[in-house]
Amino acid sequence: MRRREFILNTTITTLGASFLGAHDLLAGCAPASMIKGKTRILQLDLVTSSPLKELKEFYTSLLEFPLLSEQNDRFTFQAGETTISFTQVDEAAPTVFYHFAFNIPENKILKAREWQLKRTTLSATPPQLVDEKYPAGIRHFSHWNAHSVFFWDPANNLVEYIARHDLDNSSEGDFSNKDIICASEIAFIADETKRISDEIMSSFDLSQYRQGDENFKAIGDENGLLLVIKKGVTWERHTDAAKSPGSNKTIVTINANKGTSWKPGNYPFEIIVKK
């Protein structure tokens, strides 16, 4: 199985088969001294139509990320090497949410599960991702050699901790929010997946990560992946919390060896390079 199927299940018949394999395609961020790839997500600027106070309390109090700044309509927190900002928007659109993942040490998925269960429930594991060696709530993405846990935040963002076993980033001790290494995935939702992914790859001299098709592509490497996903899908369809995202404003700052910025004409996306 691959990773696409496990985050996303399409409601469009023609997309069904292609989403059976995407989540295996992602892998994560190591501390700066360990990073060997050329892609890292340094900053995420996202929007929310949910109450900002609830979202701030979730990330800074419940998950204990440091609060960097706060205004009436915006707050920013630090998640490992990545800064993340949420800005309030007026529209009460039910599709204003995202999927992003955090890399954790490759040996701490069990401890991460225990830590998160003290704070939230976990999204149930699809049957095809169950690893009998691990307890409920842990997903096995064998094609990516990774295990992860998923949960929702108050704004319906689908959040993930992912332990990528191909990365040499194991660490000792109990799990805490200090084991969040960086944001290693952010999803762009678009109708024109081929055009968007081709433009990103050519703009920043990036490559497609392992397999992909016209409905799902992961661009970058295990330290930072830009996901381009076909619009019109349902995330976590196997659960009672199934939801379909829209093409929401997404500004991502990365490091790359080429390019300065990219912004498609008909989507609210932007990628900025910080050298």
Image (cartoon, helix red, strand yellow):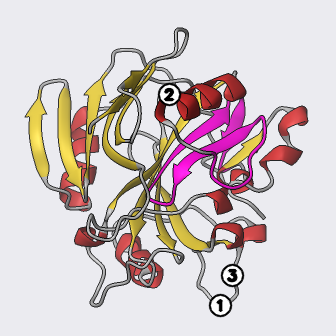
Residue for point 52% across, 9% down: 265
- Image coordinates of residue 65 in percent, x first then y, are 20, 57
Please indicate whether residue 47 sits to the left or right of residue 267 in the image: left
**Crowd tier of the residue under label 1, counting other residues whose Cα lies within 10 Å: few below 14, some 14–19, many 20 or above:** few
**Distance between the alpha carbons at the discs numbered 3 and 1:** 5 Å
Q: Residue 124 appears at what percent x and percent y?
A: 62, 65
Q: Quadrant of the C terminus?
A: top left
**Pointer 1: what residue?**
133
Quick check: 28 left or right of 64? right
Quadrant housing residue 179: bottom left
Task: Return the residue nearer the eye: 95 or 261.
Answer: 261
Nearer-N-terminus badge (3/2): 3
- What is the three-letter code of the residue carrying label 3? Asp
The answer, for residue 231, to whether it is visible in the render is no
Magenta region includes residue 118: no
User: Residue, x 74% and y 46% (percent of image)?
Assistant: 212
Q: Amino acid at mark 2?
A: Ser
Residue to which mark 2 is pinned: 203
Of the residues under marks 1 and 2, which one precedes in the sequence?
Answer: 1
Dot 3: what SS?
A: loop
What residue range appears in magenta?
Answer: 208-236
| Residue named by callout 3 | 131
Tell me if residue 211 is in the magenta stretch.
yes
Task: Give the residue type that dot 1 points to.
Answer: Lys
Residue 266 x/y as whole percent: 55, 10
Q: Element at badge 1?
A: loop
Which of the labelled discs sits on residue 42, or is there none?
none
Q: Are marks 3 and 2 in contact (CB under 8 Å)?
A: no
Residue under the point 46% across and 43% down: 157
Crowding at dot 2, Cα within 10 Å, few <14 / some 14-19 / many 20+, comes out as some
Q: Quadrant of the N terminus?
A: bottom right
Q: Quadrant of residue 174?
A: bottom left
